[in-house]
C-alpha cells in the first residue's frame, strides 16, 4: 500500500508526518523511516489521528521506535502539516500524550515556512532519572530535573562545547539531557541536548523551555525578561515564561516544510482500517467545540 508523508524541520530537529497510517507496527515503521542511512532520516515520526473536540491527536515515535509524550519542535512541524491539510492558519488545539497544546501559526513571507507559537503547558519538578547519581556531577553545579509532559535534566556548565554530551546522555537514557551556559547576549542561553530515543539533536523545543526555566531559576537570565533566547546547534528559539498563565511556558520558532515522501508498505505491515479517513469541516456542529480536521 501507499503511505504519504511530509518531512519538516524546526531548527534542524526533523520529523516525518503522516495521517492515519494503516500499519500494524508503528514503532517498527518509525525505526525504518527515520534511519538516516536506510530510510529517509528523521528524529521522529509524527502520526496524526482524529480526536473529537480537537484539531487532531499527535502521536510521537522517536527514531528508535520508542513512544514519547511530547516534542516542542515536533508539534510545530505537526501543526504545519495539519494547516496544509486543513487549508487554513486558524489556531489548533492538538491532543498529545502530555495533554492538550494550543498552537498559533503565522506566515513569514516564505511559502515553505511558518512561525509557530505553542503553549507548552506547565513546568513541574520531578525526581532524578535512574543512574543520575552514578554520573557524579559536582555538588556546586546547578541541576534541575523538570517535566514538560516529558522528562528533562538541565545542567549548568561553563562551556557547552567542552562537555562530552554523548557520553553523559548515554548514561541516563531515560531523560532528555540539556547542558546550558549563559549568553552570548543578555537574557539568552546556549544549550545542547541529548534527547531520549534520538541521541544528540540540533534542537529540542521542550528542552529549550526546560533550559530557559532552569536558567531563570539560577539567575543566568532575568526572571522578568519578556522572552529568553535559547541558542541551539540548529538555530535559536524564543521562550516566554509564565505565559499564557503563571507556571506555563510558551515556545516560539520557525518550522519549514522540506518536502513530500511516498512509501510503498508491504502488506504484512498493514493493519485493519480502524480509523475513519473522512476529513471533517470546522463548524459543522453546533456545540462550539472544535471538530477534528483529520
Image (cartoon, rainbow, N blue to C red):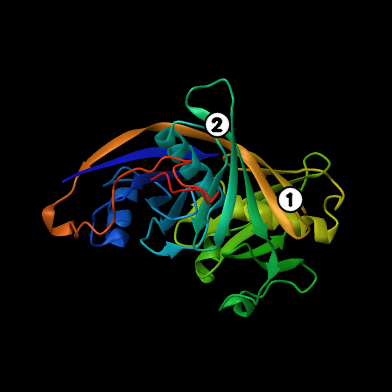
Side of 103 where 146 appears, left or right: right
Answer with mark 1 or mark 2, whichever residue precedes in sequence: 2
Q: Look at the picture and state if 260 lies above or below 196.
A: above
| Coordinates of residue 242 in the picture (x, y in percent) | 77, 54
Side of 238 where 3 appears, left or right: left
Residue at image location 77% in from the left, 56% down from the top = 215
The answer to which image quadrant residue 269 occupies is bottom left
Q: Specify the quadrant that holds the C terminus.
A: top left
Q: Look at the picture and state if 76 lies above or below 199.
A: above
| Coordinates of residue 69 in the picture (x, y in percent) | 50, 62
The answer to whether residue 157 of the structure is visible from this angle is no
Question: Which residue is more in the foreground, 45 or 23?
Answer: 23
How crowded is the residue under tag 2: few (<14 C-alpha within 10 Å), some, or many (20+)? many
Question: Which residue is more in the foreground, 258 or 158?
Answer: 258
Q: Which residue is mark 1?
A: 244
Residue that extends furthest to the front in the rendered view of this protein: 286
Q: Nearer the viewer, mark 1 or mark 2?
A: 1
Q: Which residue is mark 2?
A: 114
Question: Which residue is more in the foreground, 228 or 279?
Answer: 279
Amino acid at each position: 500500500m501507499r503511505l504519504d508523508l511530509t518531512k519538516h524541520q524546526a531548527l534542524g530537529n526533523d520529523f516525518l508526518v503522516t495521517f492515519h497510517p494503516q500499519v500494524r507496527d508503528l514503532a517498527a515503521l518509525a525505526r525504518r523511516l527515520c534511519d538516516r542511512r536506510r530510510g529517509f532520516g528523521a528524529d521522529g515520526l509524527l502520526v496524526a489521528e482524529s480526536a473529537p473536540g480537537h484539531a487532531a491527536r499527535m502521536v510521537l515515535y522517536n527514531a528508535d521506535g520508542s513512544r514519547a509524550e511530547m516534542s516542542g519542535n515536533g508539534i510545530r512541524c505537526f501543526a504545519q502539516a495539519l494547516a496544509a491539510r486543513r487549508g487554513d492558519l486558524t489556531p489548533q488545539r492538538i491532543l498529545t500524550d502530555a495533554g492538550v497544546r494550543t498552537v498559533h501559526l503565522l506566515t513569514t513571507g516564505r511559502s515553505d515556512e511558518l512561525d509557530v507559537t505553542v503553549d507548552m503547558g506547565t513546568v513541574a519538578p520531578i525526581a532524578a532519572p535512574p543512574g543520575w547519581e552514578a554520573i557524579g556531577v559536582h555538588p556546586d553545579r546547578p541541576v534541575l530535573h523538570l517535566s514538560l509532559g516529558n522528562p528533562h535534566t538541565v545542567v549548568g556548565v561553563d562551556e557547552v562545547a567542552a562537555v562530552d554530551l554523548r557520553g553523559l546522555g548515554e548514561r541516563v537514557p531515560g531523560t532528555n539531557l540539556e547542558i546550558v551556559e549563559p549568553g552570548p547576549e543578555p537574557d539568552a542561553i546556549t544549550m545542547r541536548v541529548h534527547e531520549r530515543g534520538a541521541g544528540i539533536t540540533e534542537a529540542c523545543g521542550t528542552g529549550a523551555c526546560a533550559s530557559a526555566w532552569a536558567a531563570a531559576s539560577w539567575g543566568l537570565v532575568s526572571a522578568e525578561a519578556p522572552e529568553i533566547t535559547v541558542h541551539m546547534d540548529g538555530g535559536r528559539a524564543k521562550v516566554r515564561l509564565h505565559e499564557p498563565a503563571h507556571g506555563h511556558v510558551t515556545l516560539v520558532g520557525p518550522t519549514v516544510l522540506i518536502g513530500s515522501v511516498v512509501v510503498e508498505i508491504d502488506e504484512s505491515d498493514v493493519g485493519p482500517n480502524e480509523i475513519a479517513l473522512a476529513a471533517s469541516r470546522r463548524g459543522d456542529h453546533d456545540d462550539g467545540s472544535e471538530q477534528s480536521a483529520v
